[in-house]
Image (cartoon, grey):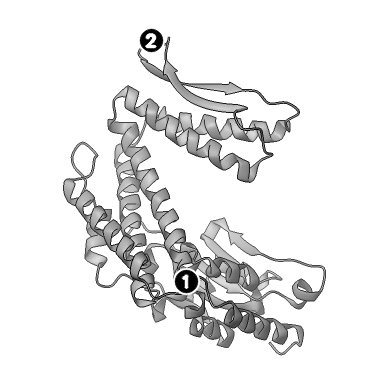
Amino acid sequence: MISKDILKNKEYDFIKTNKHLGKNIILLGLSGSYSYGTNNENSDIDVRGVALNRKSDLIGMTSFEQYVDDNTDTCIYAFNKIINLLLNCNPNTIELLGLNKEHYLYLNEIGQELLNNKKIFLSKRAIHSFGGYATAQLRRLQNALARDSYPKEEKEKHIFNSVKNAVHDFSKRYSSFDEGSLKIYLDKSNQPGFDLEIYLDANLKHYPLRDYKNIWAEMSNIVKDYDKIGKRNKKKDDNHLNKHAMHLIRLFMMAIDILEKGEINTYRVHEKELLLNIRNGKFQKEDGNFSDDFYSLLKEYENRLTYAANNTSLPEEPNMTKVEEFVMSVNERVVKDEI
C-alpha cells in the first residue's frame, strides 16, 4: 500500500517549493492502477492534485493552469481549470473525486469542500465524455490487433480509417482548409504485395508551413506505427494490449455508476478480480486476439451503458448555479487572504 509518506521523498520536493503549489494545494491523491485497485508489481505511482489559483492569478497578471512533473508522474491542476474539466465529467479528473479515503495523500478543508460538492458536477455530459474515452480505448485495442493479425488489405483499410479520423480532427487544431483540398482515399496499388493502397490528393494554397508539417507528421506517425509489425516486443505489447482492454471495461463501469447511481467510484472493489483477470491476459488467446468471452463482456457493458444513458435521472447539464456559488466562495476567500 502506498502511504502519505511518499510525499516526503526528495523527488516530490517541488510540491513544497513551486510557487504555484505549496500552501495552495488543497488535494493530492493517487491515480492510475493504484486508485482503481488494479495495480501489480510493475505499476507506476501516479499522483494527481488540485491547487488554488493565487490571488495574482485571479485579479492580477499571473496565470496558472497545471503543473506536470514527468519524473514522478504527477499532475496538479489549478482550481479553476479542474472545475471546467469536472463540468464536462472528464474521466481523468472526475475520478479524483471518488477515491478511497486511504488514497488521498493530502486533503485540507477546501479540498474536502470540493469532495462534498462532487455531485453538482454530474450530468448527462458523462455519456459523451466517458463514451468518447471508451471509444478511443477501443480504437487503440483494434489498432494493435490490426497490426498483428489482419491480412495486408485489411490493415491498409484500418490505417486508412485511422488517418481519415485524424484528418477530420485537424480542423480543430490547425488552420482550416477548404473541403476537398486534402483528400484521403483507397485505390488500386501498383506496389508489389499491395492490392489496395492509401492515396492522398492535396491542393493547399497560402497554407502555414508549420501547420502542414505537423499534419504530415501526424499522418506519417500513424503509418509508421502500423509498419512496426514484426519488430515489436510481444510480451511488452501484450501487456499494453491487456491494459487497454482492462481500462476499456473499467471506463464502462465508472460511467454506469455515475449514470445509474450518481456515484463516482474510482476503486473497483466488486469488479477488481475481473479487471485483474483482463489485465493478466486471461481473456487473450495464443494468437494475441481476445476471446469471445471478452467481446461478450464488452457487448454486455455497452448495452448496460446504453440503458443507463437512456434511463439516467441525471440532469442534462451540471448545476451551474451551485458550481458558480462554490467557485466564487473559494476564490473570494483567496482574494481576501482568508485561505
Q: Earlier in the sequence, mark 2 or mark 1?
A: 1
x 78%, y 67%: residue: 62
Badge 2 vs badge 1, beta-carbon distance below 8 Å:
no
Q: Residue shown at 26%/67% (left/top)?
A: 272
Foreground of the two, 297 or 106:
297
Q: Amino acid at mark 2?
A: Pro
- The residue pinned by badge 2 equals 192
Residue 218 in picture, x, y percent from top left: 55, 35
Q: Nearer the viewer, residue 223 or 309?
A: 309
Q: Residue furthest right?
A: 61
Q: Is residue 194 above or below residue 250?
A: above
Under circle 1, the secondary element is loop
- Say which quadrant the C terminus sits in: bottom right
Q: Secondary structure at mark 2?
A: loop
Residue 229 in sight here: no
- State the separation of the CA atoms marked 2 and 1: 53 Å
Residue density around tag 1, few if under 14, some if 14–19, many if 20 or more, within 10 Å: many
